[in-house]
Amino acid sequence: MRRVLFEIIEGVRIAVQAIWANKMRSTLTTLGVIIGIASVTLMATVINGLNQEFEKSLSQLGADVLYVDQFPWGQNTDREWWRLRNRPAIQPALAQTIRDRARFAAAVAPTTDTDRTVEYQGRDIEAEITGSTPQYGRIRDVELAQGRFFTQSDEQGARNVCVIGADIANELFPVATPLGKTITLNGPPCRVIGVQTPQGEGLFSGPGTPDERSIIPFSTYDKLFGVSRQWGVNIMVKVREGTSMARAEDELTGILRTARGVPPGERNNFAINDQQQIRASFAGTKVAIYGVGLFLTGLALVVGGIGVMNIMFVSVRERTKEIGIRKAVGAKERTILLQFLVEAIIVCLIGGLIGLGLSALGAMGISALGFSASLPLQTVLIAFVICVGVGILFGIAPAWQAATADPIEALRYE
């Protein structure tokens, strides 16, 4: 064991000396490895960031919430568009039907929304105005930094009250507190009774994010803007704790088919959605990105590996006499093999380090642009494993040639 360790240390020392003696050649040799490692780590970094933002955005939907809608989510409905568009819209009264009949529903809330300009004393911001019942706060786990959520009394009285997102509060009230102030929603006035905690931009930005959303009672929304009977509403159903999603969906399907008069044997004229459908849709996109990225990365690593192998063959040729001398004084084939194999691995590791540095700079640049990108330790370890693998795979042939060289022929080589 001590002898093997000594051979490895000696091999590293000789390899570093050989690389240092040919700095320019070694640097050019690693270009393919640099490009390959930078590609694979940057791709993993971006996809990891996208996954984090996607999960963060998806968590807002709730893992235990079913959404009753006219159309299904995340499916290719182009071929069935003409059939789906003829479905009757989901009407608000259906929410009460579900509330009365569903045993597995802990909370039910209809929702509808519109984009409006929210104004206060000359300041304005584009925001999504969402109308819903007080159960909305429970279903979507709304957290408030200030004030309160609207109550059933506010809903029954159709009061002009609202709970605004953090971005709206910061934009309209940079200094003063928003509570108690009256803002206008493209004309209609609304008194601020609560401010949500900041949620961040997430994967999707714009008026649809919680930070740029104003929530008002459903009855108030109907009074101010009118609930479209043509397009209907969405209905959120929070599943009771301890009940499986499949069981709750089956119960909800039966209630909806009865309430909407769907005859036995006919297709549903509604859709019941949950976050799993969006996750499944995103999974296909993620696989495609991974596939393209891995193909390009593999191509770059193969090109880099071939470059490393060619340079190692040149190195073996240049040091043929040295190999002959070492074998003449008793060096074993294993020692020669290990020396050149270690040299190939070190060349690849140098390329990997440079590639990781470029990837880190790229991640910093992406983060500076406002997108999420992180370089986890797992990705760094994978990059080093790839470097070692490429070094062994493409360095074994020249190392074997050096190890099996005839010592007499090697000594006579000029």
Image: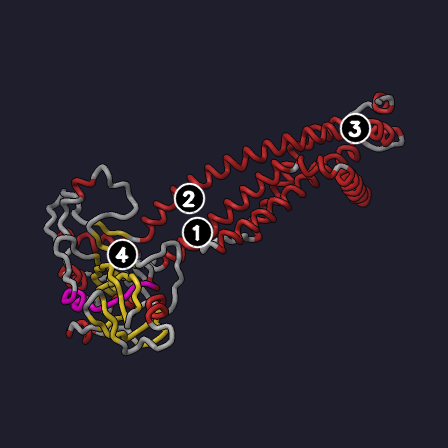
Question: In this figure, which residue is indicated by the disc labeled 3?
Answer: 318
| SS class, disc 1 | helix
Q: At which x and y percent is residue 237?
A: 24, 60
Task: Assess whether residue 98 is covered by the magenta stretch.
Answer: no
The mark lying in front, picked from 4 and 1, is: 1
Question: In this figure, which residue is indicated by the disc labeled 4?
Answer: 66
Disc 4 and disc 3 in contact, CB within 8 angstroms:
no
Quarter of the rendering containing residue 332:
top right
Q: In this rendering, does residue 100 appear at all? A: no
Colour convention of the picture: secondary structure
Residue stretch in magenta: 212-224
Q: Is residue 364 left or right of residue 395?
A: left
Q: Is residue 224 left or right of residue 334?
A: left
- Please determine whether, in this image, residue 184 is positioned above or below residue 294: below
Disc 1 and disc 3 in contact, CB within 8 angstroms:
no
Instruction: Give whichever of discs 4 and 1 has the lower sequence position.
Output: 1
Q: Count how many numbered circles sit on residues in the image.
A: 4
Instruction: Give whichever of discs 2 and 1 has the lower sequence position.
Output: 1
The alpha-carbon separation of the residues under discs 4 and 1 comes to 22 Å
Q: In this rendering, does residue 87 appear at all? A: yes
Residue 51: assigned label: 1
Question: In this figure, which residue is indicated by the disc labeled 2?
Answer: 286
| SS class, disc 3 | helix
Instruction: Give whichever of discs 4 and 3 has the lower sequence position.
Output: 4
Instruction: Give whichever of discs 4 and 2 has the lower sequence position.
Output: 4
Location of the N terminus by quadrant is: top right
- Residue type for callout 4: Leu
Query: In this view of the protein, which residue sits in the foreground, 116 or 234?
Result: 116
| SS class, disc 2 | helix
Tell me which secondary structure the magenta stretch mostly adopts: helix
**Callout 3: 10 Å neighbours few (<14), some, many (20+)?**
few
| SS class, disc 4 | strand
